[in-house]
Amino acid sequence: MEVLKFTSKIDESGYLNLNIATQWAGGEVDIVVVLNPVSSQGKQKSSYDFSDLVGRLTWQGDALLMQRTLRDEW
C-alpha cells in the first residue's frame, strides 16, 4: 500500500484529473480519494469567541496540602 498526499486543482467543469506515476507494474488497484478544500487564507481561525470563558482562579491556601488531602481521601 502506498499513501500519496498532494494538492491538485478541480477544473471549471468540476473534474479532478489525476496523473500519478507509481513504482508498480500495470494491474488493478483500489483508489481512495478524500477531497478537503484548501483555504486560501491558510490557517482558519475559530469562529467562536472564547472571551466570556476567560478568567482567573484566586486560590487562598496551600495548593499542595489541598492536593494531598484530596488524594488521601481516595
Image (spheres, helix red, strand yellow):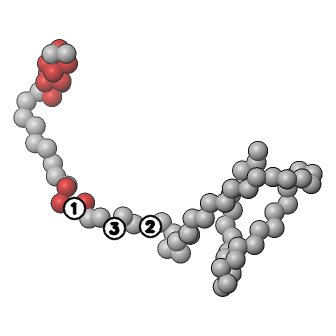
Q: CA distance from mark 3 to mark 1?
A: 12 Å
State the SS at label 1.
helix
- Quadrant location of residue 51? bottom left
Report the amino acid beneath label 1. Ser
Residue 7 against residue 29 in the figure, above or below: below
Report the amino acid beneath label 2. Gln
Report the front residue among 38 and 42: 38
Q: Dot 1, how many residues are within 10 Å of its Cα: few (below 14), some (14-19), or many (20+)?
A: few
Report the front residue among 29 and 9: 29
The residue beneath circle 2 is: 44
Lateral position of residue 60 relative to residue 9, left or right: left
The residue beneath circle 3 is: 47
Estimate the x, y position of residue 53 in percent, counting from the top left. 19, 55
Disc number for residue 9: none
Q: CA distance from mark 2 to mark 1?
A: 18 Å
Lateral position of residue 38 relative to residue 23, left or right: left
The residue beneath circle 1 is: 51
Q: Which residue is located at x 11 percent, y 27 percent?
A: 62
Report the front residue among 18 and 49: 18
Residue 21 against residue 25 in the figure, above or below: below
Instruction: Look at discs 3 and 1 and give the one toward the viewer.
Output: 3
Q: CA distance from mark 2 to mark 3?
A: 9 Å
